[in-house]
Image: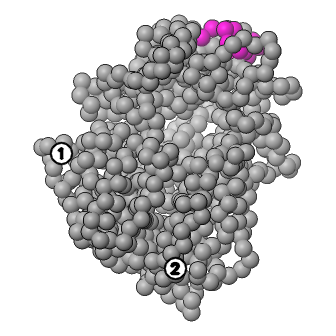
Amino acid sequence: MPETAGEPTAFHDLSAFLATPRVNRLALSPDGQRLVAAVQGPNADGNGFVSGLWDIDPTGVNEPRRLTRSRAGESAPAFSADGTLYFLSGRENNDPAAGEHDDEGPGVWALPERGEARPAARHPGGIAGFTLARDAGVLAYTAGLLPGAPDAEAHGKLRKDRAEAKVTAILHESGITRFWDSDLGPDEPHTFVRTAGDGGPAAGEGNGSAVDAGGQGFVSDAETALSPDGTRVAHTRFVHGPVPEGNRSVVVVADAATGEELHVVDRDGYEYGAPLFTADGSALVCVRELVATYETSFSYTLVRIDLPGGAESDLLAGFANWPLAAVVSPRRDDETLWFTADELGHSPVFRRDPDGTLTRLTASGAYTSLCVAPDGRTLYALRSAVDAPPTPVRLDAAAPDQEPVALKAPGAVGRLPGTLTEVHTVGDDGFPLRSWLVLPEGARAERPAPLIVFPHGGPQTSWNAWTWRWNPWPFAARGYAVLLPDPALSPGYGPRMHERGWGQWGGRPYRDLMTMTDTAEARPDIDATRTGLAGASYGGYMANRIATLTDRFKAIVSHASIWNLRSHQAETDASVHFRRVFGDPRTQPERYEEDSPSLAAERIRTPMLVVHGAKDYRVPVGQGMSLFQDLQRLGVPAKFLYFPDEGHWVLGAAHARLWYATLLNFFDHHVLGTPWHRPELL
């Protein structure tokens, strides 16, 4: 192993690193006095993760306090109008007075400030997500109905009949059949609404009312909203086109009591999602996507939809980057909104005033889970960065380029085994390029560090936030520098960054990556003779593409990667997206043939580690298997790390530890020349 400096950190022990608590969601009470976080950690068996809820002091004075604990865990915290805390959980209902329920899957639970949690909504097969009205006792949740089932009771009976008959078959008549790592069907998501007087949303099964407000496709709690008074519900709907290329997502506004459709947000050439009602309920704010074509990249903006008329206006006209998340002011007299967007290796918070003025509130870091105080003067959020895990922070809701106030919370990682810097260069077309570079402790001209290059996935993503799956710091702890480059197609660099790489996955982005690697290797603290590369998803595709174009790297890791573009287009759950970008392979084969790594397999000389999960539907496992078979056929040194029960991401705690150990040992062997060490349990 390479020599490292300083005392060991959490990143020197993979088990300790993966056991670090992970803060992943915030909720603020209506009076602004309570801030609750969902915090994830290893489960009792050590083979997965479970989430619990914690009270975080908004003033930053008091230590965090754990609120919930169960084997099933609790997630998705949200407050109702009366201050009751709601959450999702698959925990059992131990109330002896409770009736029989189909307890498979999570339900919505309510936890008063004093007292025990009680079930608030259940549904046979479980609830996918929920939302609460800001000013009324109304809850909306997303759950499935089997074909032919008009309500939850009939749905539960059909589920029981299928189970007793041992039927698992699904008949699809249109649309997509799989999504990321899940099979879709046989049930279809619908939105249900419960009401219960002034005492808050209905408790338990059968109390209050549950009204199907329609909906199809895949929906999460981020895709459902209630008007502040609880009288209307907005949710996304997947619409099947006359041909698959016409499939799209629209937003439906319905009467919360009757389910009657009041308005559909739909427009040719666009998709809509993430609806939010304004504080006075007079309009929706939605994310609008320009659908990609063979010639033109997709793009995102925020739009306002006036109700009931449906007049639409672009809220971010002229803004160079794509909004990722938005929240609206809770004040009825204020149309201010806040959102985040990737920008130059960060993901700042932006404020949009009613007159259209935009103010960047943060200069560094990446922000998620925005919450606005009742007076609209304070924001709470989770802040992370490449060198900092997510932590709750407090922000002034108007001050530009400020430093947030960190709040006390679980999840500190302690000292890092290195430092973070930036690397700047220009592409062959003169476009400015930047990367993050992680340097291990002790790296200097007298002892330059070996380098690992991490092409990111997407390709429409960028390196700007902490990640638990592709974290560079365990590599730094082993003595490696890690380059995190943002090549063509990365967001946060304006529309030109997309245009210069559109339609040429293995062209301009490849050249950018090589230029950024050249610049990093030219540093005196980097050993240019010992360089490896590892990528996943699009980054895995790029790893394969690079392996066919250069032998400059000592070793390459290809995770969840596309090997044969043409066969992948027919197998992936995102087939329509790939036809839009690459064209119909029968009539427009050019891009498939130009950019498919499999067509140049005989050029590969670099040792490769192939990693794939059997339940990966975005990049089906046949891609990884075909790559491994071709490498063996051609005599290229290769290994295949296969996860039969993982999908596109390696999520199991034990599997994640083995993933890191295998990659590190593979690079140690081929980049540093140490003997191969097979990880324990493999």
Q: Amino acid at mark 1?
A: Pro
Mark with earlier residue (1, 2)? 1
Task: Name the mark on residue 585.
Answer: 1
Work out which quarter of the rendered image holds the C terminus and state it.
bottom right
**Residue at x 46%, y 40% (from the top left corner):** 181
Is residue 201 part of the magenta span, yes or no? yes
Pointer 2 local density, CA inside 10 Å: few below 14, some 14–19, many at least 20: few
**In this picture, is 118 found above or below 478?**
above
In the rendered image, residue 226, in percent from the top left (x then y), is placed at: 58, 21
- Residue 365 appears in the figure: no
Foreground disc of the pair 1, 2: 2
**Residue at x 31%, y 21% (from the top left corner):** 173
- Residue 612 appears in the figure: yes
**Could you tell me what secondary structure mostly forms the magenta stretch?**
loop
In the rendered image, residue 583, in percent from the top left (x then y), is placed at: 20, 44
Query: Which is more toward the observer, 150 or 275?
Result: 150
In the rendered image, residue 215, in percent from the top left (x then y), is placed at: 45, 20
Is residue 479 part of the magenta span, yes or no? no
Q: Amino acid at mark 2?
A: Pro
**Residue at x 52%, y 81% (from the top left corner):** 674
| Start-end of magenta stretch | 198-213
Q: Quadrant of residue 310?
A: top left
Q: At numbered mark 2, what does the secondary structure look like: helix, strand or loop?
A: loop
In the rendered image, residue 59, in percent from the top left (x then y), is placed at: 82, 46
Residue beneath label 2, please?
Answer: 675
